[in-house]
Every structure is written in C-alpha cells, then in structure tokens.
Image (cartoon, helix red, strand yellow):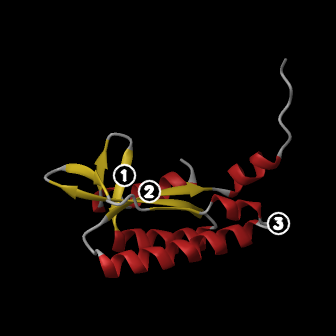
Amino acid sequence: MSTISQRIKRYEDRGVKKEAEHYLPVQEATRIVQECSQKRIAVIGIDFVHIREGKVQPHVPINSADWSDFLRAARWQDVVARCNAASLRVLEQEGREEPDQFCSLVFFSEEEWTADDQPQSDQS
C-alpha cells in the first residue's frame, strides 16, 4: 500500500465516501495536510463541497484550489512546502468562513513527481 493510500485509509472513518471520492471535514483535512508535510507528500489540489441529505453538492460558486504550478520547483522539498502551506492557508480560511464544508484532497508523491520528469519513450 502506498504512503498516500495509508494516509487516506487512516481518515476513512472521519469523512464521507461517495463513489471514488473521499470527502473530509475541513478540520480533518487540515490534520491530514500537516501529516502529509511530515511524510513528504504534496497536496496539489482541493475541491470544496457541501454534503446535505446524503448528497454531495458542489460549493457555489465553485470553490477549489490547484497548486500544480508549484510542481515546477527544482526540489521536492520545495514542492511539498509550497503546496502544503498554500493548502493549509486555504483550509484555515474556509474553516472560518464555512466550517460545515467538506473537501476532497488531491495528493502527489515524490515518485510521481520524479516519473513526470522522465522523458517519455516513443513507442511508434
């Protein structure tokens, strides 16, 4: 099981799982981002939703964050630091404004980052 899968599994009972997505309360998402920083995992995106009457409802207006531009940093430590600091700021702000929100986190590992840097072979 990957490190990312292990992080998510630890929080399965604290959120809501709908189809392939796992939605965490904003406060729990803050904790998982802090753990990801310790484990050198980057949170490169967040999508905010409301869960009402058992249904996932997108936040209106659409509310999400995308830190994929930070993947261009020269060192993995910088990617993790920038992505996770930005994620924590957004989660803190959203938690103050709408504490009943849930969110889905997009994780990225150093292995994925390194693989993205490898030239793709031409199979044609």
Three-letter amino acid code at disc 1? His
Type of amino acid under label 3: Ala
Mark 3–mark 1 distance (CA, rounded to whole Å): 31 Å
- Residue 23: x and y, percent? 34, 56
Give the residue number, with chain letter if any, for mark 3.
Answer: 74
> Decide: marks 2, 1 in contact (CB < 8 A)?
yes
Q: Residue at x 85, y 17 (%)?
A: 124
Residue 72 lies, in percent from the top left, at: 76, 61
Closer to the camera in the image, 69 or 122: 69
Residue 92 x/y as whole percent: 42, 80
Instruction: Tell me if mark 2 has few (under 14), some (14-19) or many (20+) residues whose alpha carbon lies within 10 angstroms of its own.
Output: some
- For this orientation, the residue located farthest to the front is 61
Q: Quadrant of residue 67?
A: bottom right
Residue 31: x and y in percent read 43, 74
- C-alpha separation, residue under disc 2 versus residue under disc 1: 8 Å
Q: Quadrant of residue 79?
A: bottom right
Identify residue type, mark 2. Ile
* Left or right, 82 with reference to 65: right
Q: Under tag 1, what secondary structure?
A: strand
- Residue extending farthest top: 124
Q: For mark 3, give the secondary structure.
A: loop
The residue carrying mark 2 is: 8
